Image (cartoon, rainbow, N blue to C red):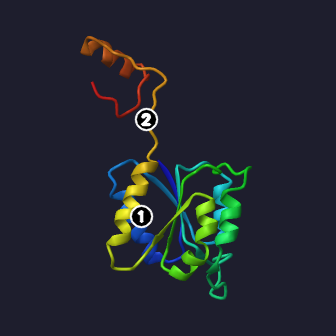
Amino acid sequence: MKVLVVEDNPEKLSEIKDVLNGIGFDIKIKDCNSIISFSAEINKETFDLVVVDLVLPIFGETVLDKPQDVTSRMVEIIRDYDSKNYKTPVIAITQFSDSAESNFSNLNRHDINVITYEQGSEDWKKSFIRKIVSCIPKVTYDFIIVCALEKEAESYIEAGYTKPKTSI
């Protein structure tokens, strides 16, 4: 599962990553800290889940680049019909409840879930975990090889027709 996390607060980013890594599923996390870097990443590859903050710096490179409400711009970027992630589930995790409330209808119209973050609280994590689990892609196979003998299975492995985690 590939997840993009857009967060400028290092402590909050660390907590989000801890929750993602604690799920017990193979999750590859990519992170960025500004609306500009978000725009670049979201157009490079397809993700299974995007986790965003609603208040971010524009460039994220200078102290003068103060965080601001970027909800409208973020929605515009990710829900653009030409975006590789147009249908990707999005979770907005914000500690600024005013920002979440003022943008609720816009986020709701674009199928973006909002979770209110409180440092030191465990409440937001439960909602976050439920949403993550619902976004885990279903495992699909192009074909399955069933071998009656262990020796047959070992031949497929030796020939390189299986993934490294294949068990006999």
Q: Determine which of the numbered discs, if any, sits on residue 113 in the image.
A: none
Where in the figure is residue 96, as x and y percent of width and height? 52, 81
- Residue 143 position (above or below residue 113): above
The residue depicted at 42 percent of the width and 55 percent of the height is: 132
Q: In the rendered image, which residue does mark 1 sit on?
A: 17
The residue depicted at 27 percent of the width and 13 percent of the height is: 151
Secondary structure, mark 2, is: loop
The answer to whether residue 123 is seen in the rendering is yes
- Residue 100 position (above or below residue 22): below
- Residue 77 position (above or below residue 11): above
- Count the marks: 2
Q: Describe residue 46's horizontal placement relative to residue 113 as left or right.
A: right
In the rendered image, which quarter is residue 6 located in? bottom right
- The numbered mark, 2 or 1, whose residue comes first in the sequence reads 1
Mark 2–mark 1 Cα distance, whole angstroms, equals 23 Å
The answer to whether residue 36 is seen in the rendering is no
Where in the figure is residue 126, as x and y percent of width and height? 34, 64
Q: In the rendered image, which residue does mark 2 sit on?
A: 139
- Residue 135 position (above or below residue 125): above
Where in the figure is residue 152, as x and y percent of width and height? 31, 12
Q: Describe residue 159's horizontal placement relative to residue 121 as left or right.
A: right
Secondary structure, mark 1, is: helix
Q: Nearer the viewer, mark 2 or mark 1?
A: 2
The residue depicted at 67 percent of the width and 48 percent of the height is: 84
Disc 2 residue type (three-letter): Val
Q: Describe residue 155's horizontal placement relative to residue 49 as left or right.
A: left
The residue depicted at 49 percent of the width and 23 percent of the height is: 142
Front-most of residues 131 and 106: 106
Kindly give the residue lying farthest to the right in the view shown. 82
Disc 1 residue type (three-letter): Lys
